[in-house]
Image: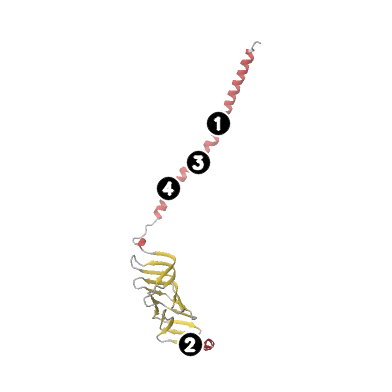
Amino acid sequence: MAADFNKLDSFFQADAAGARSHQKLNHAQRVRLAKLILPGIAAFLLSLLVIIPQLHKQINEIKIDITKPKAGELEKLHVEHTIFYITDKDNHVHNITADNIDETAPGSKLIKISSPEGTMPSDNGTWLNLKSPTGYFDQNKNTLTLQDNVEGFYSDGITMETPDLVYDFNVKQAHGEKPVKAEGFFGDLHSEGFTYDTRTGVLIFTGATDINLNEKNIKENRQ
């Protein structure tokens, strides 16, 4: 059978034309895709040119706002919202809650206490709860000073107020030498001072003392 060369030529010519058409189509698609992508890339690069200087500016501003701690600040004790533990001469531990405790100076061992509150238990089961806006614990003397209007509550049902007081852990005794106002089942009381001994649990009002007795409560307490 004789080959038909004319048909073969036409076949290869058609196939070559199809390949060229396909190449033209791919090229057109690539062009359209590039037209879509290139503007987006350009916009992204432009945005970087705007954002990077702003970030650099903000970083510089943050660096400027940072202040170095003053000399000695890192050496002082500072604790927030804590419980302060103090041990007396008989190794009894007393818990004092505080908003803040701060050493007044590096190595001074004088601790300022913000909003101190604690209970001084006695050996016979009675206790005295004390709180004030400000307090100081002297580690050298082992004393706690409460200031700025001290409020106290004695376990026998007596409330008291006094400007300041000192609790000496060496002798286990609290004392105040300024006017005291107290209220209890017995009535109202005003005195020039007070002492409270945790060894005996006895609260004593000292100096000139005025008492307005509540006779009804006293009689009921006796019964």
The type of residue carrying mark 2 is Asn
Q: Residue at x 46, y 87 (%)?
A: 211
Q: Is residue 44 left or right of residue 171?
A: right
Q: Which of marks 1 and 2 is nearer the N terminus?
A: 1
Q: Which of marks 3 and 1 is nearer the N terminus?
A: 1
**Alpha-carbon span between mark 2 and mark 3:** 86 Å
Determine whether 20 is above or below 218 in the image: above
Rendered location of residue 8, percent (x, y) = 62, 15
**Alpha-carbon span between mark 1 and mark 4:** 38 Å
Rendered location of residue 43, percent (x, y) = 51, 40
Q: Which of marks 1 and 4 is nearer the N terminus?
A: 1
Q: Between residue 71 and residue 170, name the one nearer to us.
A: 170
Disc 2 or disc 4, which is closer to the eye?
A: 2
**Alpha-carbon span between mark 3 and mark 1:** 21 Å
Picture disc at residue 30: 1
Q: Which part of the image, by quadrant, shows the N terminus?
A: top right
Q: Earlier in the sequence, mark 2 or mark 3?
A: 3
Q: According to the image, label 2 marks what residue?
A: 212
Q: Are the residues flagged by discs 2 and 3 in contact, CB closer than 8 Å?
A: no
Q: Residue at x 44, y 46 (%)?
A: 53
Determine whether 147 is above or below 62 in the image: below
Q: According to the image, label 4 marks what residue?
A: 56
- In which image quadrant can residue 199 be found? bottom left
The type of residue carrying mark 4 is His
Label 2 secondary element: strand
Q: According to the image, label 3 marks what residue?
A: 44
